Amino acid sequence: MKNELIQKAYEIAKERYAAVGVDAEKVLEDLQQIAISIHCWQADDVTGFENLGNLGGGGIQATGNYPGKARNMEEIRQDIEKVLTLVAGSHRLNLHAIYGDFGGEIVDRDALEPAHFAGWMQWAKEKGLKLDFNSTSFGHPKSGELTLANPDKSIRAFWIEHTKRCRRISEAMGKFQNDPCIMNLWIHDGSKDFTVNRLKYRQLLEQSLDEIFAEEYKNMKDCIEAKLFGIGLESYTVGSYDFYLGYGAKKQKMVTLDTGHFHLSESIADKISSLLLFTPEIMLHVSRPIRWDSDHVTILNDDVLDLSKEIVRAGALDRVHIGLDYFDASINRLGAYVIGIRATQKAFLQALLEPIGRLREYEAGGRYFERLALLEEAKSLPWNAVWDYFCLKNNIPVGEEYIADIQQYEKEVTSKR
Ligand code: RNT
Ligand code: ZN
């Protein structure tokens, strides 16, 4: 009966959308194709398997102490597998370099090999996931305040070597999965207090990047992630947005937009249409900043909706890669994944359901009252009926049903860790 109701509600919604010129069936097909790159690091609070001890630092911080965090690769995989049963669609897994299969050995970052990720590649293939990758410059004795922008040549060389190896690993992943692996480069380099040599460090970073990117690959794509500031590095960030935007435009590299990495009142959505003109593609880290880059769980809020709408309006779903980036250690970690993935999909669903044809006609005709009125009315069109049907069709829990699944998993699995 319940399923019949969902079906019925969808049929009504479909007609309602047809009346404003939107084909809900087509929207469902499009939504099904949207892959989300799920960040592995929510599972274990950005810990990884390095056996170097907890070094912290790097300007980021997971706060909270909720029990049951994944302690090893098997547990992360088990948790991700569970998450995948609660979300629809085919997705990607975004790995950091510290999540290699090191077999209990200490493998330093300048010694990473594709072989350390062969197990992940195999596992991902079995689970129908594609992999993305990240170099890891934080949480290491050589991290300090500066890595790729370090004036000390030997430290810089260490991180250049690490990042080059990460690109090689990404290439191997992309080749293995027959789909480009997207490698994100984010470094925390910056300074706590006044910096009088800003240009010098940026020059060093530019040189390091040139060296890192010298080798051309076919099966991986690079993206570079800027940031406003990191904890303990509040006064100066070498890899600022201006820096990476300039570098990306000049060298045709993707720029990663992390929604937590800007001034809080800055619109990330408005950056999409400019980046699309000057950089090849865009990578997103959809997050939720609270007062600062706090990496709270992504939810369905206006920021995420605006961002999704701008991407859809620009017809850029094939040029924008959607990834998540948050690490909340204060609530059930799997639940955090499911909330964020579902929220992002809901945002894209609403974006796809926008009566854009009619809105554009109004705009072109200078009919601004009509444009605003339809934008307002569109907010309360029955997108949720389409969402429920999407879940039903994909055989995953509808609405809040997944809460019970998470609770069950917590009882049976994570609470025993
Ligand atoms: C940090 C950046 C970066 C990290 C991950 C772990 O502020 O957002 O993307 O969150 O690399
Ligand atoms: Zn990020």
Image (cartoon, grey):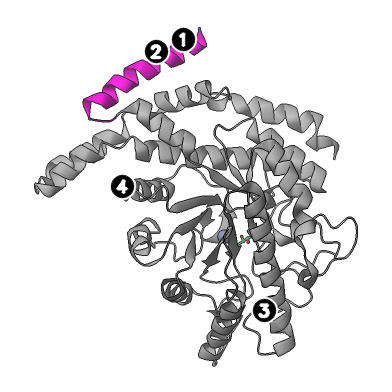
Q: Residue at x 46, y 74 (%)?
A: 251
Badge 1 residue CB within 8 Å of ligand 2: no
Q: Please say if 4 is above or below 24.
A: above
Residue 172, numbered circle: none
Quadrant where the C terminus is found in the figure: top right
Q: Please say if 242 is above or below 405.
A: below
**SS under mark 2:** helix
Sequence order check: which comes first, mark 4 or mark 3? 3
**SS under mark 1:** helix
Please give the range of residues in magenta: 1-22
Q: Please say if 216 is above or below 64.
A: below
CA gap between label 1 and label 2 equals 6 Å
What residue is pinned by disc 1? 4
Q: Residue at x 55, y 31 (%)?
A: 88
What residue is pinned by disc 3? 147
How packed is label 2: few (under 14 Cα within 10 Å), some, or many (20 or more)? some
Pick whichever, 399 or 17, lies toward us.
17
Q: Position of residue 361 (x, y in %)?
A: 15, 42
* Circles 1, 2 touching at the beta carbon (< 8 Å): yes
